[in-house]
């Protein structure tokens, strides 16, 4: 199998490794589908984590499918879709019984640290019963990758430890993935003020979209002055430190109001000054914590119910083969704008194909939607669902689509149309995705494709249409959009969406003509969100 291996400070290699085997009866072998990179992996790469030795497969986050369960595993079986916690826990030792999984006598943070991790095609998960979570049917597995580490970290170490209360004032220092996860989950408690501090304006702009009531670009004493000014000189009830430096910890000391809590989340490599001479009489508390992931079941429910959308943290996608590029992108976040990057293994596709057979009930059969359409330029199009035999023709088609036309969000992964992608795309029943193609009258040339992906509840569908460069401006996209929109409506979909580049006036106009409404895309001013509501829920 392919695996990303730490080979010493500054050195990473994508290597071929044997598939791991079950060692203890309580282990499970998980076929990883999606994983991601954590700031902690960058610390390891720098050589800051000496307990992680060269030769280690990195990664402590991800989702996958159980390939094999040890004889002592009772909660999981082969084929179960699972979320992997970054913390392994036996569930039985003294610390586990106290809910402190991070200090499990035979677990804790070991994945991608002292044992091989998730940035590989397979991973061995010790204490599987307590370290894996069932993925609810229909859940967006990619969004759940954010639950392996960063959401519980922001929530447990920042929000819970920081005792965020309704009406209180919170400052979060550091607007990276962890600070933003704290920002999202702090809102469970309706604080009155949520002030985000960072030195990267792009991250602060994101924080605004995620619900920050004020953002401060700065650090140290100047940031402290601004926060005191914002709070009438009082300071904040909760100061969450989500950077991990002396400067930012000391900033928290400068802005904490009497009776407040400083909740440290950041990993510190050095000491920080504790100004007890100022703080001794202020009734403040300082908390520290290594994430336990005890909040996982609760967070899963909030994601399922749509109370929070952790997918907002995902900015980039890569195939496992491209993981070194993913590290580059993630490691230069100020330049690339990266927050969390998703890395998909080849199994991502295989796993989804397997689960698809359970869905698609009570809807018009896709084959009924085969027909001939005539575009405004008189071109006759034969439209039909994509079939397995189309794989080669589709590969040829995608070679003739301009990169701009592959801009759609969920087509991101098609940028370089890998074999695996094509195989997945040519399965007509592929989960809740329906792929149509339009070919010339003779059936020889594929002119366009339309890919419709719906969530399990049919609340939202996303559509991407690609037209061959030499068949543009002939009304092909218009006809195909109308056809697929009718199909989606008949299938009971509530709303159909598409994400367009703001510059793509032509496509936006075309969609408007068909009753779609365009609005700014929440997190990216270069995009617009196009939506048509068919059935009110
Ligand atoms: N306690 C735990 O269990 C736990 C778990 C995971 C991560 N962490 C730690 O949480 C911290 C945050 O993680 P992340 O992934 O969001 O990291 P990150 O590096 O992506 O984000 C840190 C943010 O802090 C900002 N920053 C840097 N210096 C600053 C300064 N002087 N003033 C204001 N902002 C400044 C950066 O611009 C960046 O946006 C890290 O230290 C990480 O190791 C802790
Ligand atoms: Zn992590
Ligand atoms: Zn334990």
Image: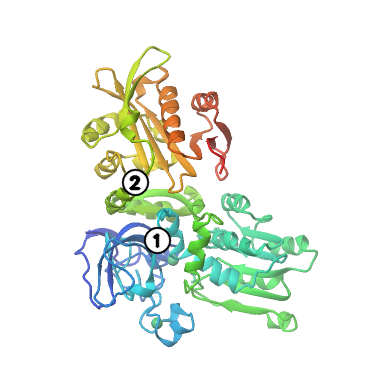
Q: Is residue 1 above or below residue 508?
A: below
| Pick the front one: 343 or 4 | 343
Q: Which mark is residue 431?
A: 2
Residue found at the very far top of the displayed protein? 378
Q: Can residue 174 be seen here? A: no
User: In the picture, which quadrant includes the C terminus?
Assistant: top right
The residue singled out by tag 1 in the image is 135
User: In the picture, which quadrant includes the N terminus?
Assistant: bottom left
Per the model, the C-alpha gap separating discs 1 and 2 is 16 Å
Task: Point out the tag, 1 or 2, that comes first from the N-terminus.
Answer: 1
Q: Is residue 461 above or below residue 166?
A: above
> Horizontal placement of 19 versus 527: left or right?
left
| Pick the front one: 298 or 211 | 298
Q: Quadrant of ligand 2?
A: bottom left
Residue at the (48%, 36%) spot, across then down: 498
Q: Is residue 392 above or below residue 155?
A: above
């Amino acid at each position: 199998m392919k695996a990303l291996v730490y080979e010493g400070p500054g050195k990473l290699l994508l290597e071929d490794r044997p598939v791991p085997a079950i060692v203890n009866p309580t282990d499970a072998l998980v076929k990883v589908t999606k994983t991601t990179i954590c700031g902690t992996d960058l610390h390891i790469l720098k050589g800051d984590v000496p307990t992680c030795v060269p030769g280690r497969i990195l990664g402590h986050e991800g989702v996958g499918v159980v390939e094999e369960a040890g004889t002592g595993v009772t909660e999981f079986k082969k084929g179960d879709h699972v979320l992997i916690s970054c913390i392994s826990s036996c569930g039985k030792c003294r610390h586990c019984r106290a809910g402190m999984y991070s200090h499990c006598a035979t677990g804790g943070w070991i994945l991608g640290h002292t044992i091989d991790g998730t940035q590989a095609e397979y991973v061995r998960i010790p204490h599987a019963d307590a370290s894996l979570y069932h993925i609810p049917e229909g859940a967006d597995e990619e969004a759940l990758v954010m639950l392996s580490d960063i959401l519980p970290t922001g929530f447990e170490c920042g929000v819970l430890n920081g005792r965020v209360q309704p009406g209180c004032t919170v400052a979060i220092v550091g607007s990276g993935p962890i600070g933003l996860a704290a920002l999202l989950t702090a809102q469970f408690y309706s604080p009155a003020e949520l002030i985000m501090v960072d030195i990267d304006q792009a991250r602060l702009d994101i924080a605004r979209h995620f619900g920050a009531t004020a953002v401060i670009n700065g650090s140290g004493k100047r940031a402290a002055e601004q926060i005191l000014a914002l709070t009438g000189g009082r300071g904040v009830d909760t100061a969450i430190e989500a950077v991990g430096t002396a400067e930012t910890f000391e900033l928290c000391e400068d802005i904490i109001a009497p009776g407040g809590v400083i909740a440290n989340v950041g990993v510190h490599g050095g000491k920080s000054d504790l100004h007890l001479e100022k703080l001794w009489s202020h009734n403040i508390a300082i908390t520290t914590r290594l994430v336990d992931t005890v909040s996982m079941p609760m967070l899963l429910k909030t994601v399922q119910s749509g109370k929070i959308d952790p997918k907002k943290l995902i900015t980039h996608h890569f195939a496992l083969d491209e993981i070194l590029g993913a590290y580059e992108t993630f490691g230069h976040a100020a330049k690339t704008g990266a927050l969390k990057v998703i890395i998909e293994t080849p199994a991502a596709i295989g796993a989804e194909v397997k689960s698809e057979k359970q869905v698609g009930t009570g809807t018009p059969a896709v084959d009924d939607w085969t027909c001939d359409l005539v575009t405004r330029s008189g071109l006759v199009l034969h439209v039909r669902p994509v079939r397995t035999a189309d794989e080669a023709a589709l590969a040829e088609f995608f070679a003739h689509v301009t990169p701009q036309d592959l801009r759609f969000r969920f087509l991101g992964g098609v940028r370089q149309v890998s074999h695996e992608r094509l195989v997945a795309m040519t399965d007509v029943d592929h989960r809740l995705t329906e792929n149509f193609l339009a070919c010339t009258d003779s059936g020889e040339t594929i002119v366009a494709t339309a890919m419709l992906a719906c969530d399990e509840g049919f609340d939202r569908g996303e559509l991407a249409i690609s037209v061959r460069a030499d068949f543009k401006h002939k009304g092909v996209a218009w006809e195909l959009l109308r056809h697929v929109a009718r199909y989606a409506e008949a299938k009971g979909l509530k709303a159909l969406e598409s994400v367009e580049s703001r510059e793509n006036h032509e496509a936006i106009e075309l969609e408007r003509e068909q009753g779609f409404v365009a609005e700014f895309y929440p997190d990216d001013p270069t995009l617009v969100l196009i939506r048509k509501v068919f059935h009110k829920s």
